[in-house]
Amino acid sequence: MATEPKNKVSRRELLKGGIAGAVVAGVAVGGIAEYQILGIKPSSTTSTVTNTSTVTATTTATTTQTVTVNIPDVTAAIAATPTTVNVGDVVTFTATPGAGTSPYTFTIDCGDGTTLTANGTHAYSAGGKYVALLTVTDTKGKKGMATVAITVNAGTTAPVQVPVTSKVITLNVNGVSQTLSVPANWSLLETLRLKLNLFSVKEGCSLGECGACTVIVDGKAVNSCQILAIEAEGKKIVTLEGVSDYGNNLHALQTAFMTRQAAQCGYCAPGFIMSAKALLDANPKPAWADIQEAISGNLCTCGNYKKIMQAIGDVGGVS
Ligand code: FES
Ligand code: FES
């Protein structure tokens, strides 16, 4: 019996785990659908393991500048160096008086609330746009101004790799105890597929809503995407590969699925068969309502429910 009733999930999400090739309508033998029912991995299948989490961190910023001079009666210019700095770096301001109107007094307003009384240095502590304003006053009280437009970028984000702690566990899968090291945050689904190459276990929604990842744990149908591998230690886990002794002895449900053509694309078939097997192991003579409840957590986006029900009913002796 499934662990809980499930809701619908979009086809895009359901299929995001990916199946190679196209949908083969109605194919029961010799295609993708057959592979899904048998649960035998293709020899060419490979997998890639990525064991990282991503967080963001603020990096450096840059400053660029342009210089303008606009003095009607008193000439002066202001410049800032270097032209590229990081937040917190020191910017040097240089004020240059014009000819013929000295002596001057200088005031440099750095644009962020701080002021220099003459040439000097300043460090910007945050990103943003500033106008450093130089005010030049001559002995007669006339004023002139020069400005430097400064942009301090807020910075960009960059991924930082954070290692995930791994743990050595022993899993009993299809009757065999296997000791392996898995990241502590890996689901049983990820572990079965990526560590043990048991590709009958499908990833659909990873939200506990589609049932594509159904396996049997201690006799009950469980969405393997919803439990951690480390939580499954000490329990008896069965996948579709184990149901048929890795294709050597087909289970009656597998035969019935092929006979009834209950797998259209076949992506959902392993999950349905595992839910049905958990039911029939506990209740070999179910009623239609029992079958409906048992597979209520499994979705078939091909809409092949009638044939799926018939296949399970054949094995359960329901007509
Ligand atoms: S992948 Fe959909 S329920 Fe697990
Ligand atoms: S046969 Fe395609 S999703 Fe069920």
Image (tube, rainbow, N blue to C red):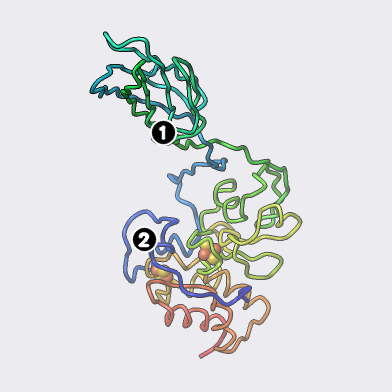
| 76 relative to 195, above or below | above
Q: Is residue 90 above or below residue 130?
A: above
Nearest to the observer: residue 239 or residue 30: 239
Is the shortest distance between ligand 2 and the CB of mark 2 under 8 Å? no
Crowding around mark 2 (Cα neighbors within 10 Å: few <14, some 14 to 19, many 20+) is some
Provide residue 234's location: percent of width, then percent of height.
76, 56
Q: Residue furthest right?
A: 234
Residue 31: which numbered mark, if any? 2
Instruction: Tell me: residue 168, above or below residue 279.
Output: above
Q: Nearer the viewer, residue 26 or 133?
A: 133
- Looking at the rendered structure, the secondary structure element under dot 1 is loop
Q: Earlier in the sequence, mark 1 or mark 2?
A: 2
For badge 1, the amino acid type reads Asn
Instruction: Please determine whether, in this image, residue 265 is positioned above or below residue 137.
Output: below
The quarter of the picture where residue 252 lies is: bottom right
Tell me, for residue 22, which label it has, or none: none
